[in-house]
Amino acid sequence: MKIVHINFWDKLGGAAIASNRLHKTMINMGINSKMIVFDKLIKDDKTVFAIDSFFNKIINSIYNIIDSRRLKKFRPFVGNFSIGTLGKDVSKLEIIKEADVIYIHWINNNFLSISSINKLLNLNKPVIWFLHDMWPFTGGCHHSFECIKYQTQCESCDLLKSKNAKDISFKDLNLKIKKIGLPHTNLHIVSPSNWLAECAKKSVVFSKNKISVIPNLIDINKYKPINKEYARKILNLPCDGKIILFGADMGLNNPYKGWSYLKEALMRIDFPFSILTFGGESQENSLNDFPFIIYNQGRLFDDYSLMLLYNACDVFVIPSLAEAFGQTALEATSCGTPVVGFNVGGIPDIIQHKKNGYLAKYRDAVDLQAGIEWVLNNTRYDELCKDCRDFAVKTFSSEKVVKQHIEVISTLILS
């Protein structure tokens, strides 16, 4: 059986990391898996194939300029919005022709268009679309927050603050309904969280498609508990005192990651602690006015450094306002580090309230503070850490998750 995964990157961003981990685990389990990306960052990986030729990069840049101009009249808006009308046709690539099963992951940045996806579906091969956010079934937003227009008809987009009923969101959603939804019976949707699966089921695009919930996986042999003092020494961190970890792609500037709520929560805590951050280069200037010590690790790309970070801290806080799954929460949990986060999106699939972490009320900085203090002052802290690790091993280990994918693939091939 030959499987091909399609994602914009092979390493950068949560979707790239998750899809690459799935791809590599399949290979390790004896499955013939390959990956197509637009921008290849791991140059020596022969199982990943890039289409980032000079010509394709020029075309992609032109597409991005066109979309930027189309969205210019709606700016500024907070959040991610992608127009799905421009992209590359990969259906004629030899690697696609040879594949028995096609996985679509995160294909925005004008890598694949809605029509490109339609051409893949028209090959009549089993296609699994692994959801990494809400874009596949909305009119263009990657997270809809409180908006539920995607369940009936996107129009006058709230994110874009559009006044036009038949705006970009209206056109994109209708194009998805026409080209991606029915009658493509060979399309199976996989969601990493129960919350995202429910959103997809309620959407007008995927309401009649088969939808399965399979979480992102974690290599429990890479992300594992180690001695906290040892981890801190390697990272040149103090061996005593409480350390709170926060990480996000784009750092403090990411509108989805809820830094303002964490900042308020931290300012309310009245015992000594330090902050450890990672994920963006622009964080230190934003933290200069804080009355506590901050250590910034910047962007990290290797599993070993991330494992050290999770082990070096006493609690990991993920105050996301929108989270399809919560890959960093899983990584921390697998390292035996308790996690505190808002009760939103896929976070409840990872955090068991007051068992391996704390689920705070949505957008409630006071309850977020209560969760952090509940972990740091917990008299059964060591048991809490053990519960984290045990839950990760039981639920998210690589082989267990891939076996769930194999079951879905088998059903698709036999149907």
Image (spheres, grey):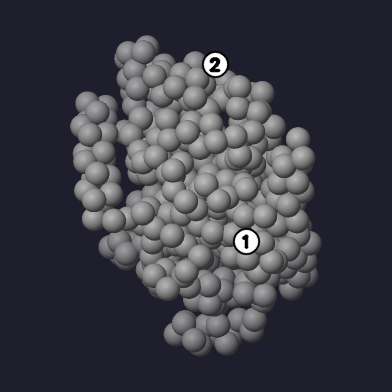
Is 359 placed left or right of 69 in the picture? right
Q: Residue at x 78, y 62 (%)?
A: 394
* 56 lies above or below 175: below
Report the disc number at residue 152. Answer: 2
Res 366 seen here: no
Which one is in front, 200 or 162?
200
Q: Position of residue 204 (x, y in %)?
A: 57, 20
Q: Quadrant of residue 82?
A: top left
Q: Quadrant of the N terminus?
A: bottom right
Q: Quadrant of residue 277?
A: bottom left
Q: Position of residue 40 (x, y in %)?
A: 38, 61
**Mark 2 or mark 1, which is nearer the start of the sequence?**
1
Q: Residue at x 51, y 48 (%)?
A: 96
Report the residue that reaches farthest toward the top.
165
Q: Residue at x 49, y 31 (%)?
A: 118
**Dot 2 amino acid type:** Thr
Res 174 seen here: yes
Report the disc number at residue 21. Answer: none
Q: Quadrant of the C terminus?
A: top right
Q: Residues within 10 Å of mark 1 (few under 14, many from 20)?
A: some
Q: Position of residue 79 (x, y in %)?
A: 38, 38
Report the disc number at residue 32. Answer: 1
Which one is in front, 255 or 357?
255
Q: Residue at x 29, y 56 (%)?
A: 53
Q: Position of residue 391 (x, y in %)?
A: 76, 61
